[in-house]
Image (cartoon, helix red, strand yellow):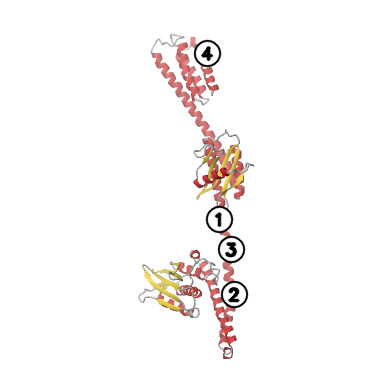
Amino acid sequence: MKREYLLAVFTVAACTGICFLIFPRAELTNLVMVYLLGTLAVAARGYRGPAALTSALSVLLFDFFFVPPRFTFSVSDTQYLWTFVVMFAVAMSISHLTIRLREEAEAAKRGQKQTGMMHAFTQLLANTRSPGKTLRVAADHVAETFAGEVTIFVPGSTGGLQAAVRTCPEELSDKQHAVAQWVYDSGQHAGMGTDSLPDAEAIYVPILGAEGPVGVVSMKPLVRRNRPDPDQRKLLDSFAHQIGMALEVERFQDNARKAEMEAEAEGMRSSLLSSVSHDFRTPLAAIMGSADALLGKEELLSNDAARELLENIQVEGERLSRLVQNVLEITRLESDKVKIQKALYPLEEVVGSSLERVEKLLEGRNVKTDIPEDLPLVPLDPVLIDQLLINLLENAARHTPSGKSVEISAGKFGESVSVTVADEGTGLKPDHLDHIFDKFYRDPSSPGAGLGLSICRAIVTAHGGRIWAENRPGGGAVFRFSLPLK
């Protein structure tokens, strides 16, 4: 800066010399133009202090050497005072506008440079396909751009931050990890040049994603005195934002790929189950028919062992038949091939039909029903609701010991009818309540394939209702579903 002030003094001296050369043949106003040109030349270098000094010295030297009486600061005519004021004002205005124009040009140049850097960085990240490579490429580019050592922190498997990528060979201290963790938790900047921990050797910037921080990038200048200025901090923020967007894109793509693979696997599994289930129905029907025929022969009924085996074949065949039917039903419901054929039905008839079909399963249990006589007709598909009640009653029979009660009740609540199936079994584990209606989800200690309750939910959803489960205050489980009356 000292050099700029010396240059300002030299410029004014040069303008004075030029004025001496042309003074005999030029008017005073022309000499003023020479000094204004000198002021413009100094201001073009972009320093306000030297430009102001040039303006002041130009007025003083013009007065001293050329305004009568010459070689004195006295003024013979007061009109020259206005000349000095205007000359100084014009000189200052010219220097201010010139410096401002230069600053805007430099700002535009810096903006263009940063835009080019951001474009190159974005292209670099766009051509990288995995999170690990993305972080490595980002760290190398930021280190090269800012001439510093860069570390990128991301959440580890244990929940805390870990240094995923770093360009410095030295091990990170606990303090650096602590600062990075604070930046991640707060989502704010810290370190060099910020309000938080300004004496730190590096600047820490949060990497923000769509749902909050996804990491932290730290940059330590190789030369400590090269502290990042506001423009560089802004560029580092932009780089961190681009890293966050790249990581978010990678996460969305991974989720999309996983969802697509899961959908394909689910489709293949459903198709396989459907085809296998159809193939099972014929031999199952033959086995059950043979068992029924053999049970009708008197000579076999007199043999207790043979009768017990045949009854076991019949019971297990019926259970396997229900399992196959459940598999077929869930695949049909999920493939949207089932059309709900609603009609107005009395609910007690559907409940009675279901109880009749599971009569053997409920042997030894005290079955109680409470269906109000004034219950309105319910719009439902009787085949599907019958299947729904059979699954709920079979589940209740499986978990209710002999001698205990299974209760079925119904009631009208607003614009819907609610049906309850309650048992006096062991009840439901609290962590199972949110998943009990998921397909293939079951208690490991319970028999079955975990399809019955998922079918119940699919049927109720198809009717526009809802189903839920809870524990009974006195012990046991309660399953409720509601069906809209309209």
Q: Earlier in the sequence, mark 3 or mark 2?
A: 3
Disc 3/disc 4 C-alpha distance (Å): 91 Å
Q: Determine the residue positioned at 49% across, 71% down.
A: 426
N-terminal-most mark, 3 or 4: 4
Which sits in the foreground, 2 or 68? 2
Mark with earlier residue (1, 2): 1
> For this view, does 405 lie left or right of residue 257?
left
In front: mark 1 or mark 2?
1
Question: Compared with residue 141, is residue 325 higher up or lower down, i.e. above or below?
Answer: below
| N-term mark: 1 or 4 | 4
The residue type indicated by label 3 comes to Ala
Judge whether residue 194 can be spotted in this image. yes
Tell me how far mark 2 sits from mark 4, CA to CA: 112 Å
Query: Label 4, on which residue?
Result: 17
Disc 1 element: helix
Whichever of callouts 2 and 4 sits on the residue coming sooner in the sequence is 4
Question: How far separated are the C-alphas under marks 1 and 2?
Answer: 36 Å
Q: Residue at x 47, y 20 (%)?
A: 55
Q: CA distance from mark 3 to mark 2?
A: 21 Å
Which residue does the numbered mark 3 point to in the structure image? 265
Tag of residue 255: 1
Badge 1 amino acid: Asn
Mark 1 or mark 3, which has the lower sequence index?
Answer: 1
Q: Is residue 30 visible?
A: no
Please identify the quadrant where the N terminus is shown: top right
Residue, far left:
374
- Label for residue 279? 2
